Amino acid sequence: MPIIEEVPKKTEFKRIGVHSHIRGLGLDENGKAKIIADGLVGQTEAREAAGVVVQMIKEGKMAGRGILFVGPTGTGKTALAVAIAKELGEDTPFVEFRGSEIYSLEVKKTETLMQAIRKSIGVRLKEKRSVYEGVVKEVKVRRVRHPYNPYVMVPREAKITLETKDDSLTLTVSDEIAEQLLSQGIRKDDVIWIDAQTGRVFKEGKVKGEGQELYLTGEKIVEKPTGPIKKEKEIVNTVTLHDLDLYFASRRAGLELLLGFSPLKEISQEVRKAVDEQVKKWVSEGVGEIIPGVLFIDDAHMLDIEVYSFLTMAMESELAPIIILATNRGVARIRGTEMEAPHGMPLDLLDRLLIIPTRPYNPEEIKQIISIRADEEEIALSGEALEELTKIGTERSLRYAVQLMVPSKIIASRKGRSSVSKEDVAEAASKFIDLKTSTEYVSKYEKLFIH
Ligand SMILES: Nc1ncnc2c1ncn2[C@@H]1O[C@H](COP(=O)(O)OP(=O)(O)OP(=O)(O)O)[C@@H](O)[C@H]1O
Ligand SMILES: [Mg+2]
């Protein structure tokens, strides 16, 4: 039997739209920040510090420690965390979590955090499997009427011809495999492998052109395999601890889940323990490798004392991700207590954190950031519109200026203009107010209504 019978659904990493222009930290080979690079502008000290962190993570020297970005709103704390994720590459799990996400009526606070922690730890599973691998030359699915519904045709079996540079083989496969061939849309010229034992079908991509049609499907292009069709192949799957928790828990819950009871809100201690033991076993057998990822907690001051203690404990445990926190609070009350503390966080947590400050931007930097965002969103700004947005970014907030760009473009295009003018920006700013104005607005009415 394979390590796990089917690959659990992968955790999806969400990407925040307003940071899509960021491609990395923009450092040179000596770790010095280039003024403008990888979508980032200025903030050079913080970027260089972040570069050191990336190196520490890559060298495995961040265990038990964390990072805290502190700075006023709109100074790029979230942007820098996203840049760190980009530098670490796709293979390192990076989970974004907002402090406020822990407040849910349905799930316990610590459970929500625990799930986020386990989503940030990857397990790379390597195993040798016996597979049939090759380029699909022909595939024919035989269908029969559904036994209970004569109007539906279901696959009965399939005949598939695979080819490598040196071999060719025609297989007759079961209905289960036939169904996978259909659901994955396997066609001629696809390179696939079929697990000899479990019948799992995996599509690797389209075979590299042999002078035939040109495929413009965005599919991965792969070399035609060599050697025999039936072979031993090393297969690598990266899943997270959370994926494994869900997989083990659903296997235990089995029937209950099938009948639609109790959607899995909480994963039991026993399941997690079983998963951890299994993972350690895989590691000791040489088939598994643990990849500690990053858990980024934005607006970390939203957490409360109970969650902070849990987090501090989690940082010290054997299987821990690297924690990156960000906050724009100075001295604040620790939620759940009457105590005031730096950044509203308990000292035993702060003791474990390396602190990176971010500083406000000057108008020139704000202008650059707005231009980069305009390019990213394919928005053409007139010179005056850029000046106006820069002014808004300097006087109100960078975030507000960034958020006004798309509305300004829509306003311009309604007037039949492809380029955004100063008036469009002004109109957008009058329709959508900034945070300071909106707070003043509501408090003005509060005075009118509350006696
Ligand atoms: N140095 C930079 N270079 C390019 N873009 C930046 C830079 N700093 C911030 N930005 C962009 O400006 C906007 C605001 O920055 P960001 O959201 O990162 O601020 P923040 O410090 O996290 O603020 P808050 O405390 O309100 O969460 C985002 O769209 C971000 O991508
Ligand atoms: Mg932020």
Image (cartoon, grey):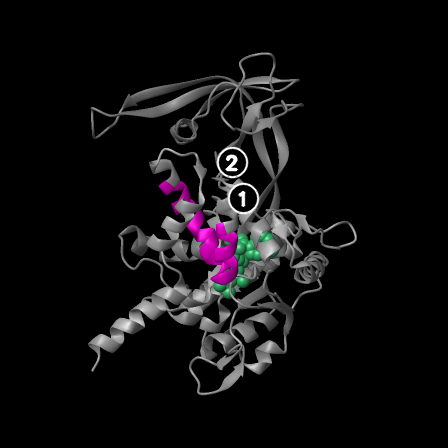
Where does residue 65 sit, x and y in percent of width and height?
A: 64, 70
10 Å neighbourhood of mark 1: few (<14), some, or many (≥20)? few
Front position in the image: 232 or 235: 235
Identify residue type, mark 1. Answer: Pro
Q: Is residue 22 above or below residue 174?
A: below
Where does residue 2 sit, x and y in percent of width and height?
A: 54, 44
- CB-based contact (under 8 Å), mark 1 and mark 2: yes
Where does residue 394 sit, x and y in percent of width and height?
A: 52, 60
Q: Residue at x 72, y 60 (%)?
A: 52
Q: Which residues are magenta?
A: 388-411
Q: Quadrant of the C terminus?
A: bottom left
10 Å neighbourhood of mark 2: few (<14), some, or many (≥20)? few
Report which residue position mark 2 lands on.
Answer: 197
Identify residue type, mark 2. Answer: Gln
Front position in the image: 2 or 381: 381
Q: How many marks?
A: 2
Q: Secondary structure at mark 2?
A: loop
Q: Residue at x 32, y 54 (%)?
A: 257
Q: Earlier in the sequence, mark 1 or mark 2?
A: 1
Q: Residue at x 33, y 37 (%)?
A: 414
Report which residue position mark 1 lands on.
Answer: 2
Q: Is residue 65 above or below residue 19?
A: below
